[in-house]
Image (tube, helix red, strand yellow):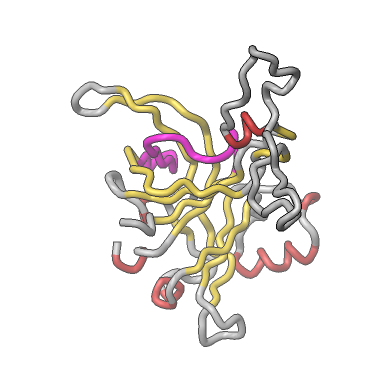
Amino acid sequence: MGKNSQMGLIGKKVGMTQMFDAAGAAHGVTVIELGPNTVLQAKTTTGNDGYAALQLGFGQRKVARVTKAEQGHYKVSGDSLPRFVHEIRVPDATVAAHAVGSVITVADVFKAGIRVDVTGTSKGRGFSGVMKRHNFKGFKRTHGVHEYHRHGGSIGTRLTPGMTFKGVGMPGQMGNEQVTQQGLLVHKIDVERNLLIVKGGVPGCDGANVVIRIAVKK
């Protein structure tokens, strides 16, 4: 793993299925199309950017949907207009090991049996109440409770200090935010089809963009 110990790749969530282990037990897994990624730009701490990172591209877009400025930027790496672009912070040694225009595959970074962190955008649930959004219990439906079954209850503090504190669970927008699922186990890697199969679920709907890094918490 050496030079890629803090590396990551970008890809697309394909969907969920189940696979069996050696003991015959079924496990829910998520299939992710991970790469190949093209290195679009390399940044170093000694350069103009002041930090080390790799800008990666994944997928394909039509020319009509790419601005002239973006086309000029992608032309440096020789890449054919990626659909998803993301920058990943890595050490200078990792930047030096990957030249602009080079291609990184799933087998170059990951292997079966390791833990990974998956970052994506969660499914949007719209405007939701406190029971769905914050797992509130709700009120009784008997003994004089009148049209107050799914309410959040009191939020005020009366005269002192006379305000509503931050962080109080209330109805509002649910989902559609960046979420990182940590410590997922890599069940299998399909090198030929660039697939990474992890145990459990990952944020986002099928077809959503995801970023996968080697787990921070070992």
Q: Which of 29 and 101 is in front in this view?
A: 29
Residue at point 80% right, 63% down?
68
Number of marks in the image?
0
Above or below residue 155? Residue 141 is above
Q: Does the magenta stretch include residue 180?
A: no
Q: Does the magenta stretch include residue 202?
A: yes
**Residue 25 shows in this picture:** yes
| Residue 137 picture location, percent across and down | 57, 27
Image quarter of the N terminus? bottom left
Q: Nearer the viewer, residue 62 or 157?
A: 157
Above or below residue 45? Residue 3 is above
Which residue is situated farthest in the left direction here? 23
Above or below residue 126? Residue 76 is below
Q: Nearer the viewer, residue 46 or 71?
A: 46
Which residue is situated farthest in the bottom direction here? 46
Residue at point 65% right, 46% down?
168
Residue at point 51% right, 55% down?
37
Task: Judge left or right: residue 145 versus residue 202.
Answer: right
**Residue 206 shows in this picture:** no
Residue at point 53% right, 70% down?
100
Q: Which of 144 and 130 is in front in this view?
A: 144
| Residue 57 picture location, percent across and down | 58, 57
Task: Judge left or right: residue 9 versus residue 6.
Answer: right
| Residue 33 picture location, percent across and down | 49, 41
Q: Main secondary structure of the magenta part?
A: loop
Which residue is situated farthest in the front direction here? 159
Residue stretch in magenta: 189-208
Image quarter of the C terminus? bottom left
